[in-house]
């Protein structure tokens, strides 16, 4: 089983996590910029953080056979802190870098005017840099926050097929898929979604434009939740090809829209073949487009 975890915060994880992820079939990850758990007091701390996402973390992941890409943004929680406002001026420097395949996490935390302004500006940057967007939906008032997100995306002019709306659940999935955006689901031990609920969503809505992630970070989370979801899908009667689509081909297709996704050919061998899936070489990973 080959796995691309499209939302995981490896900055918060250990080398043992990388080892266990590789053993479970994880061959690629996308790490979006996020809140580190305590307030950052100035723009300089973001510079150091972004440098680690484009430099150190890809190097660390490579030691364990995992390809690491990232998304860069001012996250919605810290968009409310005036000390972080200058980060928006810093972003273009990083959005031009090869390993950055999306703008994110952007979106809402408390749905404030400051978050509105940060989201709108970063959607403009996504257009300017021709990058897809990873959107964080709020943990509180999720339905209202998701509807507001979709309204802002619609007004921004960003094509819906270039937008991944994440942290969804059974209440919000239909409204996202109806717009043409991609739907992301975070599988957690106690909160958000679990494997069984995710399987039920896939049974109801199918495997197209759906991404499953662990969103593992510094809190109680599990970087192997993608694998556990794949196993649950197989146990529920999904085919190996359907599992491969959700856990590999869908994230490759979405982030491939950046034209920067570079997954070594060695990562396309045994894991996919074990599921009966095929892939036509590394050339499809650059500039990949949405599947019908």
Image: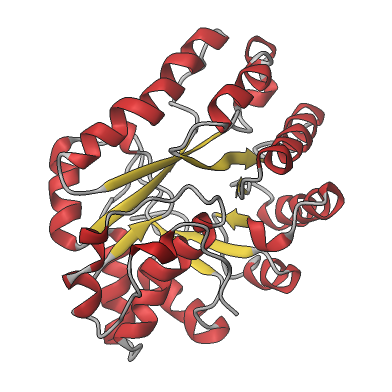
Does any portion of residue 12 appear in the rendered image?
Answer: no
Quadrant, the N terminus: bottom left
Q: Residue at x 15, y 44 (%)?
A: 64
* Occupied quadrant, residue 114: top right
Q: Residue at x 20, y 60 (%)?
A: 266
> Which residue sits furthest right?
155
Q: Note whether 23 is above or below 15 in the view shown.
A: below
Q: Residue at x 47, y 12 (%)?
A: 45
* Occupied quadrant, residue 126: top right
Report the front residue among 111 and 262: 262
- Marks counted in the figure total 0
Does any portion of residue 173 appear in the rendered image?
Answer: yes
Rendered image coloring scheme:
secondary structure
On the image, the x and y values in percent for residue 220 come to 32, 43
Quadrant, the C terminus: bottom right
> Which residue sits furthest front?
283
Report the front residue among 274 and 19: 274
On the image, the x and y values in percent for residue 25 come to 20, 62
Q: Residue at x 71, y 58 (%)?
A: 143
* Occupied quadrant, residue 93: top right
On the image, the x and y values in percent for residue 7 come to 43, 49
Q: Note whether 269 is above or below 186 in the view shown.
A: below
């Amino acid at each position: 089983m080959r796995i691309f975890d499209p939302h995981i915060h490896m900055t918060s994880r250990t080398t043992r996590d990388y080892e266990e992820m590789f053993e479970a079939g994880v061959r690629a990850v996308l790490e979006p910029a996020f809140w580190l758990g305590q307030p950052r007091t100035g723009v300089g701390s973001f510079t150091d953080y972004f440098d680690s996402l484009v430099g150190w973390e890809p190097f660390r992941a490579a030691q364990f056979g995992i390809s690491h890409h990232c998304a860069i943004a001012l996250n919605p929680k810290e968009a409310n802190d005036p000390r972080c406002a200058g980060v928006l001026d810093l972003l273009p420097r990083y959005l031009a870098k090869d390993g950055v395949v999306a703008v994110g996490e952007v979106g809402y935390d408390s749905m404030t005017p400051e978050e509105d302004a940060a989201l709108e500006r970063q959607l403009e940057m996504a257009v300017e840099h021709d990058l897809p967007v990873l959107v964080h939906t709020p943990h509180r008032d999720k339905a209202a926050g998701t509807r507001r997100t979709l309204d802002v995306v619609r007004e921004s002019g960003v094509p819906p097929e270039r937008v991944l709306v994440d942290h969804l659940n059974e209440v919000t999935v239909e409204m996202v898929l109806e717009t043409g955006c991609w739907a992301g689901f975070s599988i957690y031990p106690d909160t958000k979604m679990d494997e069984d609920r995710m399987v039920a969503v896939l049974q109801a809505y199918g495997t197209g434009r759906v991404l499953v992630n662990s969103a593992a970070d510094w809190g109680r989370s599990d970087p192997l939740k993608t694998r556990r979801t794949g196993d649950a899908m197989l146990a529920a009667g999904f085919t190996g090809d359907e599992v491969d689509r959700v856990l590999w081909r869908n994230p490759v297709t979405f982030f491939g829209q950046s034209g920067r996704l570079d997954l070594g050919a060695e990562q396309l061998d045994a894991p996919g073949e074990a599921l009966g899936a095929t892939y036509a070489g590394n050339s499809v990973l650059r500039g990949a487009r949405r599947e019908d």
